[in-house]
Image (tube, rainbow, N blue to C red):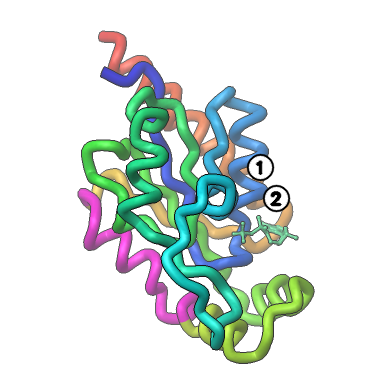
Amino acid sequence: MRTAPNVIITGTPGVGKTVHCEQLAQDLGLKHLSINQVAKERDCYETYDDERKSWVVDEDKLLDAIEDEVLQGGYLIDWHACDLFPKSWIDLVVVLRCPSTSVLYDRLSSRGYHETKLQENLDAEIFGILLEEAREAFEEEIVVELNSEKDDDVDSNCARITTWVDTWKKTQAE
Ligand code: DAT
């Protein structure tokens, strides 16, 4: 049994997954598992999508690559998708949101995203695609939606997640 929970931090690119994971890793001592980085380091790519200028991850290979670690518990899984992870691996799913299209536009354009990819991501955020995906894949009570628009949001979100993790640990210890 895990003694520390596994938390997915998901959302459209640019919503703040990395900044939240970095702060939470520091505050809580959980390990930041950036799926982008793991897929690159462990060669979990299937093919290159020329239109989107991005690599497509081989999900089976990725899950095999991380399974032993993740089952130990204590991971912050940072990825823009969540429905590939088995339910039994996951204790909390945090879906970060950025309701202001102009804020998200600025974040993504400063990354140099080309127009198609930028528009696709803005649409995904407007329609709440990631939240819907999380609610379909996991039990409703472990999915939380948090706003990540302003600097203050990062601190208040991390404080909420910290409280949740502490409660989880206490409950497990009983
Ligand atoms: P992601 O990992 O979801 O792609 P990120 O953590 O790299 O996103 O954040 C993208 C940029 O936006 C980065 O420059 C930090 C900034 N940012 C994210 N969340 C923020 C917030 N709540 N307030 C202010 N800036 C934020």
Residue 138 lies in the magenta-colored region = yes
Binning the other alpha carbons within 10 Å of mark 1 as few (below 14), some (14 to 19) or many (20 upward) gives some
Query: Which residue is nearer to you in this view: 23 or 47?
Result: 47
The answer to whether the residue labelled 1 contacts the one labelled 2, judged by CB atoms less than 8 Å apart, is yes
Q: Find ligand 1 in the image and state its quadrant.
A: bottom right
What residue is shown with label 2? Answer: 152
> Residue 21: x and y, percent?
59, 42
Image-quadrant location for residue 164: top left
Q: Report the side of 92 relative to 118 (left or right).
A: left
Residue shown at 41%/29% (left/top)?
69
Asked if residue 148 is positioned above or below residue 25 in the image, the reply reads: below
Quadrant of the frame with the N terminus: top left
Q: Report the side of 120 relative to 149 (left or right).
A: left
Quadrant of the frame with the C terminus: top left
Query: Which residue is nearer to you in this view: 45 or 15?
Result: 45
The magenta stretch is 124-139
Q: Report the side of 120 relative to 53 (left or right).
A: left
Kind of element beneath mark 1:
helix
> Residue 68: x and y, percent?
35, 29
What residue is shown with label 1? Answer: 155
Most extreme residue toward the right, as rendered? 110
Most extreme residue toward the top, as rendered? 174
Would you say the beta carbon of the disc 2 residue lies within 8 angstroms of ligand 1? Answer: yes
The amino acid sitting under disc 1 is: Asp
Binning the other alpha carbons within 10 Å of mark 2 as few (below 14), some (14 to 19) or many (20 upward) gives few
Asked if residue 129 is positioned above or below residue 161 in the image, the reply reads: below
Q: Main secondary structure of the magenta part?
A: helix
Residue shown at 22%/62% (left/top)?
136
